[in-house]
Amino acid sequence: MRYVFMILYRGFGMRLPASGSRGGRYWRVLRRRAAKPLLASMGRDVNIEKGAMFPSGVVHVGDRSGIGIRCHLKGPVTIGSDVMMGPEVVIFTTDHAFSDVGRPMREQGMRAVRAVTIEDDVWIGQRAMILPGVTIGRGSVIAAGAVVVKDVPPFCVVGGNPAKILRTR
């Protein structure tokens, strides 16, 4: 049955106009209904934007949170409540193995999956990247274009590549 909903969402739901466009309130409701069966859990008043991609059955989204326009979630991700996500954010939960210098990297396969956790009241700016195993603490802000390679403490503003603490809130 999930396969049917995946076709419905990817073939129809994710292509609906963005929430900010004319009639956006209706597109938002249709996209949410098409996406809900694919998510592991979905809170109240969640916004899944146009072009958002995520794997089936491993993403949890809390109340009043959103997945931004053309965002890509690449594995198990837990998103808390009141999380704002800008366009084109990418969240990775695995990467390529490369420790054996005697073999080509393409033959070494993938490393183990490490879930990403985004706690409540987080703002993630446009085109930020979050790498495997990262936890973003409650109330934090991730600057646009940041590459987050390690955990972010609560109430911190981070930016850069690799992301560093710029200040606290």
Image (cartoon, rainbow, N blue to C red):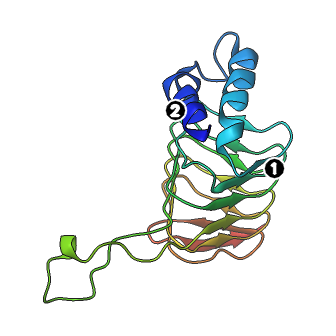
Could you tell me if the residues under marks 1 and 2 are in contact, i.e. CB atoms within 8 Å?
no
Instruction: Give whichever of 156, 65 is nearer the camera.
Output: 65
Task: Measuring from the top left, give residue 85's x and y in whole percent.
Answer: 64, 46
Element carrying mark 1: loop
**Label 1 belongs to which residue?**
82
Ranked by sequence position, the earlier of labels 1 and 2 is 2
Task: Give the position of the N terminus as an image quadrant.
Answer: top right
Q: Position of residue 64 (x, y in %)?
A: 82, 43
Q: Quadrant of residue 45?
A: top right
Q: Is residue 92 above or below residue 152?
A: above
Residue beneath the point at 76% across and 18% down: 25
Left or right, 102 with reference to 67: left
Q: Residue at x 65, y 74 (%)?
A: 152
Say above or below: 115 vs 16. Answer: below
Determine the residue positioned at 35% across, 72% down: 110
Task: Give the quadrant of the C terminus.
Answer: bottom right
Q: Which residue is mark 2?
A: 51
Tell which of 59 and 125 is nearer to you: 59
106 left or right of 146?
Answer: left
- Report whether 32 appears left or right of 6: right
Residue 2 position, x and y percent, is 61, 40
Q: Residue furthest top?
A: 22
Identify residue type, mark 2.
Answer: Gly
Say which amino acid is labelled 1: Asp
